[in-house]
Amino acid sequence: MASRFNPLKADAHWQQVWDDAGSFRASEASARPKAYILEMFPYPSGRIHMGHVRNYTMGDVLTRYRRMNGFEVLHPMGWDAFGMPAENAAMERKVHPGEWTWSNIATMKAQLKRLGFALDWSRELATCDPAYYGQEQALFVDLFEAGLVYRKESEVNWDPVDMTVLANEQVIDGRGWRSGAMVERRKLSQWFLKITDFADDLLDGLAKLDQWPDKVRLMQENWIGKSRGMKFRFALEPQMRGGIKSVEVFTTRPDTIFGASFVAVSPDHPLAQEYASRSPEVAAFIERCKQGGTTAAELETAEKLGLEIGEAFHPLDPDWELPVFIANFVLMDYGTGAIFGVPAHDQRDFEFATKYGLEIQRVVAASADDADKPVVGEAESGDGILVNSRFLDGKNVESAKAAVIARAEAEGWGEGTTVWRLRDWGVSRQRYWGTPIPIIHCGTCGAVPVPKDQLPVVLPEDIDFETPGNPLDRHPTWKHVACPKCGREAARETDTLDTFVDSSWYFIRFASQPADRPFDKAVAERWLPVDQYIGGVEHAILHLLYARFWTRALQRIGMIDVAEPFRGLFTQGMVTHRTYQDKDGNWLLPEEAEAATEAGKAVTPGRVEKMSKSKRNTVDPEPIVDQYGADAVRWFMLSDSPPERDLEWSEAGIEGAWRFIQRLWRLAATSETAAGEDKALDRKLHQAIAAIGANIDSLAFNKAVANVYELANAIEKAPPSASRTAAVETLIRLVAPMVPHVAEEAWAAAGRPGLIADAPWPEADPALLIEDEVTIAIQVNGKLRDTLTAPKGSAREALEEMALASEKVVRVLEGSSPRKVIVVPDRLVNIVA
RNA sequence: GCGGACGUGGCGGAACCGGUAGACGCUGGAGACUUAAAAUCUUCUGCCCUUCGAGGCGUGCGGGUUCGAAUCCCGCCGUCCGCACCA
């Protein structure tokens, strides 16, 4: 047996063996219980990065562990291949997005293969393949026909120089990233999916997702944002009307109705639009409100702007007039697009009132005595007792809400209602590299879905990115087609689908991919739901919510009987690395920093951050695999940091992992056989079997790694015995899911038949998990003074007696008698003096 | 702005349900082996104090509950992440 493990030879060898044996192909026909393990599929950006390696290593350990435990595991891989970076590459490097994408896929696939992941490559798919997106178009048509798709106007970021729509990430400090022009908000007619139809169901479903992180469930709950409130109407003064007699507002705080200082409507509100059509001043103001981006953060931190346009009457007091404003912080998409402002108890209203000199009237106070206490500095949004509020005085917030709603409903000027923060999903993108929306616009028939026998609608190849805007729209022939209904001249939809649509059903297509339809119902149901889904927390809301919605939508139209696509979810942390800057503030690559330091140049080490190209703190996995082999990289990815937290890449860390792989190999290769049992080692081994299994089960890989080290340390210290020989053999099986190459090599070297990949997971003997002796802590007043060893299950009295007899205890007590003794069996004795 | 999370030695972290804080790894010190280096092995490594027996202090900060708090409660401070056209 060789004295060193050579990953260069072993990795490729075993990868080939697994491949030839089809070890990781999932079979629907298997009688074993199924496990569907999935990591979020990568965007083919160019090369595999450490984040991918970490993500796929975790899924791989679980996959191999489940296989060893008798599961038929589906563990597929594919490519989330549409998206903006391909178009950026096309513009910058004059290469076709498809060519760029497919070549990246080839590179990254080869890189993934070198890590020895137990993937079923026979199911590989790429979303930019017409075989995939054509089926997606078919699903879109089905949803369209089921009434879950509609068209409406919606705002986008518009770059007036490049004449193009910008993604939020392309808006930097309010300017277009290429042109540098100030971005405007502009309305376009776009396609929407009715996710709000499922709002209640998506919310309820969260309660049952007990294998999801609480944090993600909470984020989704907040995102869906169900809130109880009231809609009610303010009558407008006659000269304002112009056809509009009242404005309906929404509030979650009807109790504060007597604290109202103003009414405000969104710049997009019909009332504002009505005014704009009559007054250039109002129109100009609305234009001003439209500057800046469309993100929530930008909208809400923008300086509050208002324009007074008239007066409205308080519904509970016809003599009470309030000013009506158009205000930039009121969102048309939420509630009714109009609010009434209560500056004392809402921070945004407070800022607005302060700026425009409006009254700030307290209506909620800690007690009735505080009724006249002014509200200063910031709004008070907490609980309390109603004051200055006529018939509500003295009530608490909850009962005041109910009282106002009851009165409004009785008098007919408002009603209790539920509103959702969740908005329908806008899926139109004015870009080339995406799934064409399979709709044809006909002057006579309107929007007509492309008949299924004409799918897929394939992207044209001959496009150019020289001129700004959407290449599909500019293409000379592509969009000109006959209407499928009436045959007259018509035009294709030139928008493409949001790439989140592509990732909303790929996990179903992995389970079943017939050529002639999106998936086979029975086969898909054989695998779904995904038992363990692993990916970055950045997808906690959008991707996961969209996929949950899409699956429900398919369920509604009878295509699959699954509501929740992901039973278990795990969100892993990022891989980080220290950053370095030279004296001029330029970011340095890690190796440049090292070279510069050696050359005596000043290098400033910066903070540890997520690996990114801009900070130049990336470490390319490929050369690392070349140098240390797949197992060392995998082992490092699993070590130290809890998987949900960030992992800092370090040279010392990978060196340590490499040393451990070699140590494992030496342990297996130099194991001396001898007779005799070693009870202590047996116990240690079986405790390790149980602990490692439990920790892999709960994805606590860092703890499983620590368990492995402890066992390896114990084995190394133990003298040769039959127990030790068995422990070494078992250790190899225990590490096989994590470092499969060295495990196979050791398994084969020991002359074991078959592959360790197919070997069963060792079983822990329950009798060996229990210690017969325990260490008892002896405390005096909660402070540790001594420890003693006692048989497990010793009686309280015996423990108390032993504790009081302790020399150290006697000394600390100094002759005084204890007031009380607390005994926790098998744990500790606490003497209260 | 809104929402969420996190904070334990020089570093990453462990600590079941409130019961011996610091497992395991990294770094560093000392030693062994070696002509030498690498590799490997042994051993120490929270801080302070020490008469070497022990003692004191310690889980971001300030309070509280408890026989007992890293863990529970209240109030601060700090850091990070998400926010609908990035994937």
Image (tube, helix red, strand yellow):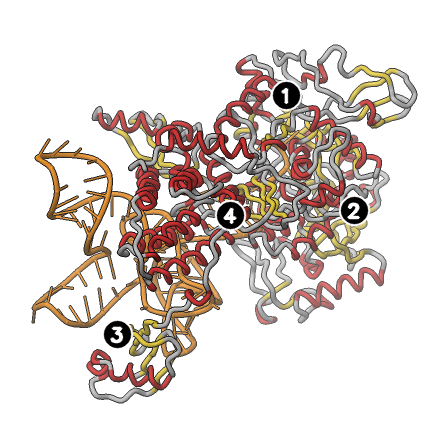
**Residue at mark 2 to residue at mark 4: CA–CA distance:** 62 Å
Which of labels 3 and 2 is toward the front? 3
Q: Is residue A714 left or right of residue A332?
A: left
Identify the mark nearer the N-term, 3 or 4: 4
**Residue at mark 1 to residue at mark 3: CA–CA distance:** 77 Å
Q: Residue at x 65, y 19 (%)?
A: A163
Do the residues under discs 2 and 1 have CB atoms within 8 angstroms?
A: no
Identify the mark nearer the N-term, 4 or 1: 4
Give the number of callouts: 4
Q: Return the residue at label 1.
A: A160
Q: Is residue B10 above or below residue A688?
A: above
Chain letter of the residue carrying label 1: A
Q: Are marks 4 and 1 on the same chain?
A: yes
Q: Is residue A705 left or right of residue B9?
A: right
Q: Are marks 3 and 4 on the same chain?
A: yes
Tell me the number on the disc at residue A786. Answer: 3
Q: Residue furthest front?
A: A675
Q: Residue at x 20, y 80 (%)?
A: A807
Identify the mark nearer the N-term, 1 or 3: 1
Q: Is residue A51 above or below residue A103?
A: below
Q: Return the residue at label 2.
A: A247
Chain letter of the residue carrying label 4: A
Tell me the number on the disc at residue A65. Answer: 4
Q: Quadrant of residue A795?
A: bottom left
